[in-house]
Amino acid sequence: MITTLPAALRAPFSPGGGQAIDAQLANRLLGIALDAGGDYADLYFEFCVAADYALEEEQIRTLGRGITVGLGVRVTKGDATGYAYCEDLAWERMAHAARTAGQIAVGGGHAPVAVAPIASVALPSFYAVPVPSLMASAHDKLALLRAADRAARAYDPRIVKVEAAFAESIKEVLLFTSDGRMASDVQPLMRFGARAVAEDNGKRQTGSGGGGGRYGMDYFTHATRDAAAHGREAARVAIAMLDARDAPAGEMTVVLGPGDSGILLHEAVGHGLEADFNRKQTSNYTGQLGKLVASPLCTVVDDGTIVHSRGAINVDDEGYPGQNNVLIENGTLVGYMHYRLSAKYYGGQPTGNGRRESFRSMPLPRMTNTFLLAGQDNPDDIVKSVKRGVYAKRFSGGQVNITNGDFVFSLSESYLIEDGVLTAPLKGVNLIGNGPDVLRKVDMLGADFELSDGVWNCGKDGQSVPVNVGTPTIRIASITVGGTQA
């Protein structure tokens, strides 16, 4: 649950608000949306308060706060979709958006469809936040940024620059559908990050640390994720990388560390399991249901029910509760991530993966918390098993072709493995491969599953949504390492 919010953080469309929306008004809008003859319509009301704070070189660089409110209306007719939105909840604007969406989808000339009686959907609660961070003072948040700055500088005198940032929001949503569902949710979100630059003898390296999720200020009460800890982590990485060697190049064994390595799974495999790509036959997982697509060691899950995780959702943006969905089980493809339209096409049920960036955007099948389940191997034994290879700890970015799964990922922290021991840090490391091929080459899987500490956003079709990733330690028998040293 979330404590009673002050008026400044409450949506105008919520009960008691100045523009309260009830089932009767929603029915009228849905009726207008379906008047042209659409099959289905939904209303997505959103109110969001967001704030950003940034410190650079011990000076406040950013201190901002913004509010957005609006309504998105979607109407479908067969495979056609109409969408319109308004940023003003005056009746005339909402009715115009509903009418426009219906006309885009249908074009007129069809008998209107009746709206079903509306009933509230029972929802879980995966982010109980008694006091959202937005209720704390700006002074408290700036104090956190300064704590990270001090901790990073105190870590080592070679730290020459520090940046820290804090982003927070609280979003209230209210959904009504023409098939009779109503759902509402209040969604807190925060992210804290620090970046440190180290310099020594003409060499310069950067490191980062951070985390967050669907928390309030209680996030910082844990010793391993307070502001100072994130500052020290940024400094640790920057200092470690000062001694980095040029990366080796060629085919070799790679060990992926637990937690953040899940971003490779998310990008190179996860997107290909979103049902819209498979419906369009643009994923290499199209037509592969029931077939072996990965090592039998691999079970891949998308789970929107992980408490406080950045990708957790009580309800998706189509009004369906968050779910735990197994996608690949013991190497076999068993399911896709669906929204309403793809579920209808495949003759199944929505999986709680219909998500959108805001009321300005149509929902799409999107990931929530996507990860590879733990295996049974000791992570130390996995490293010891490698004669020569690379240990990948942190990723800084990459490119993926969703159609075939080909990827290039850059590593921000990695180490050479020699005779089963982590030795020198490496710089300039790229992993080059194919997502499905990499999953087939997994030959050891650690028992040390970790979920990343909540810093990820996922982009698709111009929309960004919060997600999370995770893995245990993974051994990939062979993958191309792009480096500068053969």
Image (tube, grey):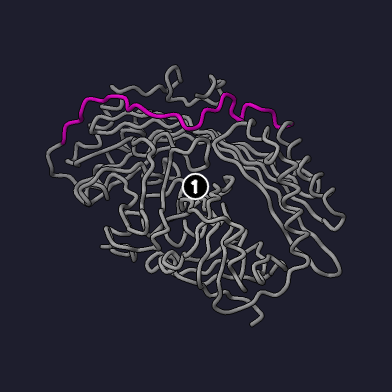
Task: Give the residue drawn at x 28%, y 62%.
Answer: 291
Q: Which residue is mark 1?
A: 467
Quarter of the figure with residue 349: top left
**301 left or right of 68?**
left
Q: Quadrant of residue 31?
A: top left
Instruction: Give the residue displayed 58% in from the left and 28% down from the top.
Output: 132
Query: Of the residues shown, which amino acid type is indicated by label 1?
Result: Val
Which structural element holds mark 1? loop
Picture quarter containing residue 229?
top right
User: Was residue 131 drawn as part of the magenta stretch in this picture?
Assistant: yes
* Quadrant in which the C terminus is drawn: bottom right
Between 476 and 365, which is closer to the camera in this rendering? 476
Where is residue 92? Give x, y as percent: 34, 31
Q: Is residue 38 magenta?
A: no
- Residue at x 72%, y 57% (from the top left corner): 237
User: How would you classify the magenta stretch by its main secondary structure?
Assistant: loop
State whether residue 322 is above or below residue 339: above
Q: Label 1: how many residues lie within 10 Å, few (<14), some (14-19) or many (20+)? A: many
Q: Which residues are magenta?
A: 113-139
Toward the viewer: 367 or 233? 233
State left or right for residue 206 relative to residue 465. Answer: right
| Residue 256 higher or lower than 77, as above or below | below
What x and y, as percent, mark residue 297?
42, 58
